[in-house]
Image: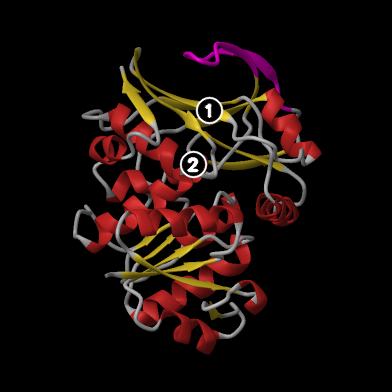
């Protein structure tokens, strides 16, 4: 069996990734920083390159599930490059994603291959289809709740610190920091959500992944206010949330949409990351080096492969 190392294997998302690797016929190698949580696994720390090299020995690829990714991504990418194996992560940290896209490496690196980042990038790319550029892209996240994991909270805190408590958006063709209050509006999501209040410019990794390969001057993310309130309050996780992600692409007075529906934003990150690794290892990619999901994979085919985890509709 092909071995894939999962760094942060004992975390919430990491456990989903390990289970999905098993389901797909891979041999997951469990790794992380805490040896006490890795019975039979490979302990390694990002401040010890030799430990990372030992952990990656014999692995065909690595999936990084350990945040904050501002701390773990670059050391693991460098270790993957030394081992000449591909690297995939589930980072939703905008600043960590920017760090990764700034790298020049020979090995394949796909950041943000998760619910936040990779999914919307695939949806936007599929909606673009034969269009070479767009005027605007809108990504609306309809979540019935958002009960963040400790990893999500730690990653959010790190991003907050790195941008000096400012907000960030992608407009006029570049990222801008600002202190303006987010505006509230209504978004009419498809079933099963329907009309919901959302916060506009609630920026996620999409403002990095999509513009990395799509010619578009403005990408705007929206988040249901209930989910944003849950995140802010660090609400305790009780049951998986239902989600609808609606991406709208506008160009020259025309409009196309792509929608994804499912449950549990953390669980669906696993098939996204594992499908990415499978496609990289089997040569089903369009480019090399650091690339987002929409740039490196055939978007429509990739989205179809996520069924039944995610239901996708293109209009």
- Lateral position of residue 237 relative to residue 290, left or right: right
- Residue 2 against residue 202 in the figure, above or below: below
Q: Which residue is mark 1?
A: 243
Q: Kindly indicate the quadrant of the structure image that contains residue 122.
A: top left
Q: Which residue is more in the foreground, 244 or 34?
A: 34
Task: Name the residue at 61% across, 41% down.
Answer: 176
Q: Which is nearer the eye, 306 or 37?
A: 37
Q: Is residue 239 magenta?
A: no
CB of mark 2 within 8 Å of CB of mark 1? yes
First in sequence, mark 2 or 1: give its number: 2
The residue carrying pointer 1 sits among few (fewer than 14), some (14 to 19) or many (20 or more) residues within 10 Å by Cα, namely many
Q: Is residue 173 above or below residue 185?
A: below
Residue 82 percent location from the top left of the image: 38, 82
Q: Position of residue 117 (x, y in %)?
A: 48, 43
How far is mark 2 from mark 1, CA to CA? 10 Å
Quadrant showing the C terminus: top left
Callout 2 secondary element: helix
* Colour pattern: secondary structure
Q: Position of residue 164 (x, y in %)?
A: 76, 52
Establish if 258 lies above or below 19: above
- Work out which residue is located at the far bottom of the displayed protein and give it: 50
Q: Which residue is painted at 66% across and 35% down in the image?
A: 146
Q: Residue at x 58, y 85 (%)?
A: 48
The part of the image, by quadrant, that contains residue 87 is: bottom left
Quarter of image, res 8 = bottom right
Span of residues in magenta: 182-197
Task: Indicate whether residue 196 is drawn in magenta.
Answer: yes
Choose between 85 and 12: the one closer to the eye: 12
Q: Which residue is mark 2?
A: 115
Rate crowding at label 2 as few (under 14), some (14 to 19) or many (20 or more) other CA atoms within 10 Å: many
Whether residue 41 is visible to the viewer of this picture, yes or no, is yes
Task: Name, please, the residue furthest toward the right.
Answer: 233
């Amino acid at each position: 069996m092909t071995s894939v190392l999962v760094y942060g294997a004992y975390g919430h998302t990491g456990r989903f990734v390990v289970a999905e690797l098993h389901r797909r016929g891979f041999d997951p190698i469990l790794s992380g920083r805490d040896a006490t949580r890795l019975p039979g696994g490979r302990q390694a720390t990002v401040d010890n390159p030799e430990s990372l090299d030992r952990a990656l020995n014999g692995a065909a690829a690595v999936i990084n599930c350990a945040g904050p990714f501002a701390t773990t991504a670059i050391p693991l990418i460098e270790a993957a490059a030394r081992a000449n194996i591909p690297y995939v992560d589930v980072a939703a940290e905008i600043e960590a994603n920017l760090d990764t896209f700034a790298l020049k490496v020979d090995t394949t690196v796909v950041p943000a291959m998760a619910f936040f980042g990779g999914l919307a990038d695939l949806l936007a790319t599929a909606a673009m289809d034969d269009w070479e550029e767009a005027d605007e892209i809108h990504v609306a996240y309809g979540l019935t709740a958002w009960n963040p994991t400790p990893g999500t909270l730690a990653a959010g805190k790190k991003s907050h610190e790195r941008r000096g408590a400012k907000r960030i958006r992608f407009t006029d063709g570049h990222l801008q920091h600002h202190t303006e209050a987010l505006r509230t509006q209504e978004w009419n999501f498809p079933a099963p959500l329907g009309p919901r209040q959302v916060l506009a410019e609630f920026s996620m990794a999409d403002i990095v992944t999509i513009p990395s390969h799509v010619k578009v001057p403005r990408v705007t993310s929206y988040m249901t206010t209930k989910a944003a309130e849950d995140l802010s309050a660090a609400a305790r996780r009780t049951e998986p949330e239902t989600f609808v992600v609606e991406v709208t692409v506008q160009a020259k007075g025309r409009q196309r949409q792509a929608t994804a529906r499912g449950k549990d934003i953390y669980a669906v990150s696993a098939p996204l990351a594992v499908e990415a690794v499978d496609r990289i290892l089997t040569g089903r990619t369009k480019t090399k080096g650091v690339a987002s999901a929409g740039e490196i994979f055939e978007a429509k085919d990739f989205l179809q492969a996520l069924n039944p985890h995610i239901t996708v509709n293109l209009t």
